[in-house]
Image (cartoon, rainbow, N blue to C red):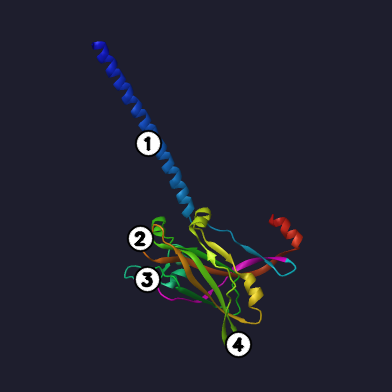
């Protein structure tokens, strides 16, 4: 009887030890998985300092490499912004050189069709590259609490006689969640220059207009779509010219 009892206790002790040992392992593995996913998640949303310093343009015969310089915005206006007594969400936040402040649309819906219009101090300026930070990048938590711009339409508006000139051949720019998870929420640079070369020709440039076409609402607490920053660059100095053959070589 005592032998049976002893062996029973022993089995119980072994069982408890087994559970404790494996619980610890399960906890350890869960903790490691959490740490790794947190780390990846954090990297994903980290604001990176992009090193965009040049752009390559094809002129029909050669590929020309230019340095870029930022353009000074004269006026930035939006079709709406979120009214708040505690925080400023106006379009001024789009051009304040701070990725932690955002313009937030002011409609009760997600802001589809809302527009932003920008003019430049230098009236002869032609923006070649646009930098956009989608969403409200104040913090990871705030970024996910709000809607993020998923698709935006960009138009260059110029004069053609008395009529407004709209370039409608431009591709929509996508900031979809799948591409975000690949490239993080670091600024998106969009080279829009080919459209100028092909379509602006004899017209005079007036403004850039951006329109919200689609938003990403997954996980959002508020039905508010945000953009943290927009900036514009024009070409500065020609630093190198490549033949088609040379360019394909360096590109690959
Ligand atoms: Ca800002
Ligand atoms: Ca809204």
Residue 176 x %, y %: 50, 60
Query: Label 3, label 4: how many angstroms apart (C-alpha)?
Result: 37 Å
Give SS at disc 1: helix
Q: Which quarter of the rendering shows the C terminus?
A: bottom right
Pick whichever, 112 or 97, lies toward us. 112
Q: Residue at x 36, y 63 (%)?
A: 222
The earlier-in-sequence mark between 4 and 2 is: 4
Which numbered disc flags the more N-terminal residue, 3 or 4?
Answer: 3
Q: In this view, does 233 lie above or below 139?
A: below
What's the CA distance linking mark 1 and mark 4? Answer: 71 Å
Is 173 situated left or right of 67 in this image? left
C-alpha span from label 1 to label 3: 44 Å
Residue annotated with mark 3 = 82
Query: Which residue, given by chain and number where applicable, does mark 2 sit on?
Result: 221
Q: Residues within 10 Å of mark 3 (few under 14, many from 20)?
A: some
| Quarter location, residue 232 | bottom right
């Amino acid at each position: 009887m005592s032998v049976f009892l002893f062996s029973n206790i022993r089995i119980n002790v072994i069982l408890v030890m087994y559970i404790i040992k494996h619980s610890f392992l399960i906890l350890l593995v869960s903790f490691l998985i959490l740490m790794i996913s947190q780390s990846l998640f954090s990297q994903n949303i980290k604001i990176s300092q992009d090193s965009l310093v040049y752009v390559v343009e094809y002129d029909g015969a050669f590929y020309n490499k230019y340095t870029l310089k930022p353009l000074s915005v004269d006026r930035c206006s939006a079709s709406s912004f979120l009214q708040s007594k505690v925080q400023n969400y106006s379009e001024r936040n789009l051009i304040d050189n701070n990725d932690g402040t955002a313009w937030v649309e002011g409609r009760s819906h997600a802001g589809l069709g809302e527009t932003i219009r920008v003019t430049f101090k230098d009236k002869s300026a032609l923006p070649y590259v646009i930098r956009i930070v989608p969403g409200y990048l104040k913090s990871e938590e705030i970024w996910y609490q709000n809607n993020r711009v998923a698709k935006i339409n960009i138009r260059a508006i110029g004069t053609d006689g008395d009529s407004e000139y709209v370039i409608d051949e431009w591709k929509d720019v996508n900031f979809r969640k799948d591409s975000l998870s690949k490239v993080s929420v670091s600024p998106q640079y969009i080279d829009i220059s080919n459209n100028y070369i092909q379509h602006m020709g004899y017209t005079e440039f007036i403004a850039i207009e951006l329109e919200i076409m689609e938003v990403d609402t997954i996980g959002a607490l508020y039905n508010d779509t945000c953009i943290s920053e927009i900036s514009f660059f024009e070409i500065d100095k020609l630093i190198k010219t490549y033949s088609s053959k040379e360019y394909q070589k360096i590109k690959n």
